[in-house]
Amino acid sequence: MFSFPKFRVGGRLRCVNFEFLPASGCYNRVMFGITTASFMQKRFAQTFRALTGVAIFAMAIFAMAILGALVGTVAADAEEVSRPAVPDAIQAPSGEAVVLLAHAAGSQIYTCQNGTDGKFAWTLKAPDAELRDESGNLLGTHFAGPTWKLKDGSEVTGKATAHVDSDDPGSIAWLLVNVTGHSGSGMLAAVTTIQRVHTHGGKAPAQGCDESHRNAETKSGYTADYYFYAPKK
């Protein structure tokens, strides 16, 4: 049986490292210390296991987030935007591929002008639209020139070379545009051809332009998809 170190002083026992106590006191004091130490050891072990579990869980979540981002990037890089189905008259050259699809929403701006035939008519002044990706994120703007400018700093101007009627009656035509100028570096830096398709709205009013409205301005809301092409790599 285990014996606690002690010695007698004046009829009382002195436990080693404790004050003078009766014999039973030595036992109780020591057992209290052992019990307390055991309890603290268990609590430490439980706390350590809990913290370890939280750390492992956090690391797992972080690893999954990184993996998801990498997979998403690879998938985005691997995905190629398909050409739209369009009449031959506005087909982009076969040696080019779609590098960007932008959804436009805004206005076609018209002014009332006197034509060469002496008749007044609404004449296109400029587009004014925002360009967004398929998730609705703002890519850039479309304005006079016609010009397409992205937030990355790249910009192109162009000239329409062919058109066909829209599938949507009463909407502006579908266009084939040749790029005539570049500015900045970014997604549009290598673009050579643009298509405007899937138009809705945007036509000039049928009435309201005459001598009394000379130089008047009006806006006609529209939406469209713009496909940007660059030479295949």
Image: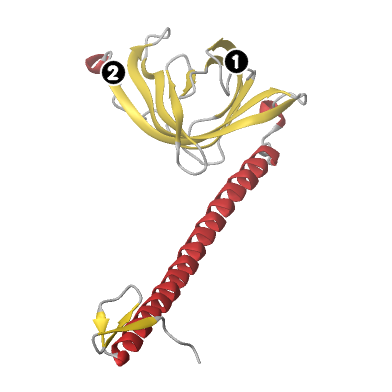
Judged left or right of residue 84, residue 49 is: left
Please give the residue where the numbered disc 2 appears in the rendered image: 210
Position of the C terminus by quadrant: top right
* SS under mark 1: strand
Q: Is residue 203 visible?
A: no
Q: Position of residue 105 (x, y in %)?
A: 42, 35
| Nearer to me, 71 or 153 | 71
Which three-letter amino acid code belongs to the residue tagged 1? Val
Is residue 228 placed above or below 198 in the rendered structure?
Answer: above
* SS under mark 2: loop
Q: Position of residue 160 (x, y in %)?
A: 57, 18
Task: Write the residue at 70% across / 40% down.
Answer: 78
Judged left or right of residue 106, residue 74 is: right
Judged left or right of residue 225, residue 11 is: left
Please give the residue where the numbered disc 1 appears in the rendered image: 179
Q: Quadrant of residue 30?
A: bottom left
Task: Write the residue at 54% across / 60% down.
Answer: 56
Task: Write the residue at 36% across / 23% down.
Answer: 109
Distance in Å between CA atoms under marks 1 and 2: 35 Å
Q: Quadrant of residue 23?
A: bottom left
What is the tally of numbered marks visible in this picture? 2
Q: Earlier in the sequence, mark 1 or mark 2?
A: 1
Which three-letter amino acid code belongs to the residue tagged 2? Asp
Task: Write the residue at 37% across / 82% down.
Answer: 6
| Nearer to me, 174 or 81 | 81
Label 1 neighbour load within 10 Å: few <14, some 14-19, many 20+:
many
